[in-house]
Image (cartoon, rainbow, N blue to C red):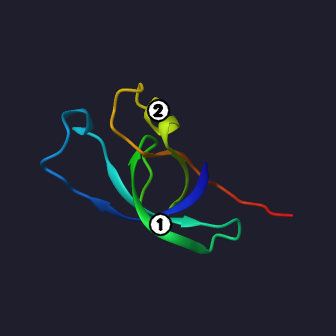
C-alpha cells in the first residue's frame, strides 16, 4: 500500500462489464512527506474519495479482493487519509 493524491477522474462508457458502476480516479503517487513521486495511475475507488484528497492505494492482486476478487483491477483506493505523521 502507498499514499496518493486524487487529481482527476476518468469516464469510460465502453469497459469491462465487471467495472460498470465503478468510479475511476487518476491518482499521483506520494512519498511520506506528501511530495509527488513516480507516474500517475488510474485506480478504482471503493471509499468515495474526491478530487484533491490524500488516499491509501492498494495494488496488485490485493486490489482485486476489495471488490470480491473477480474484478479486473490493479489499483484500488481503500482509504481516505486524515493526517500523516513522520518521525
Q: Residues within 10 Å of mark 2 (few under 14, many from 20)?
A: some
* Residue 46 in view: yes
Residues 62 and 85: in front is 62
Separation (CA) of disc 1 from disc 2: 22 Å
Residue 63: x percent and y percent?
A: 47, 39
* SS for dot 1: loop
Which of the two discs, 1 and 2, sits closer to the camera? 2
Residue topped by disc 1: 52
Residue 83: x percent and y percent?
A: 69, 58
Residues 71 and 34: in front is 71
User: Is the C-beta separation of discs 1 and 2 under 8 Å?
Assistant: no
Look at 46% across and 70% down and name the residue there.
39
Q: Is residue 72 left or right of residue 11?
A: right
State the quadrant of the C terminus.
bottom right
Residues 38 and 85: in front is 38
Up-down: is 29 above or below 72? below
* SS for dot 2: loop
Kindly give the residue lying farthest to the front in the view shown: 61
Up-down: is 39 above or below 77? below
* Residue 51 in view: no
Residue topped by disc 2: 66
Disc with the residue nearer the chain's start (1 vs 2): 1
Kindly give the residue lying farthest to the left in the view shown: 14
Q: Is residue 46 left or right of residue 13?
A: right
Amino acid at each position: 500500500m502507498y499514499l496518493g493524491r486524487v487529481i482527476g477522474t476518468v469516464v469510460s462508457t465502453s469497459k469491462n462489464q465487471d467495472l460498470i458502476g465503478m468510479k475511476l480516479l487518476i491518482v499521483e503517487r506520494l512519498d511520506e512527506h506528501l511530495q509527488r513521486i513516480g507516474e500517475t495511475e488510474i485506480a478504482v475507488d471503493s471509499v468515495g474519495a474526491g478530487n484533491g484528497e490524500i488516499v491509501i492505494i492498494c495494488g496488485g492482486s490485493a486490489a482485486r479482493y476489495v471488490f470480491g476478487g473477480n474484478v479486473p483491477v490493479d489499483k484500488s483506493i481503500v482509504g481516505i487519509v486524515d493526517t500523516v505523521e513522520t518521525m
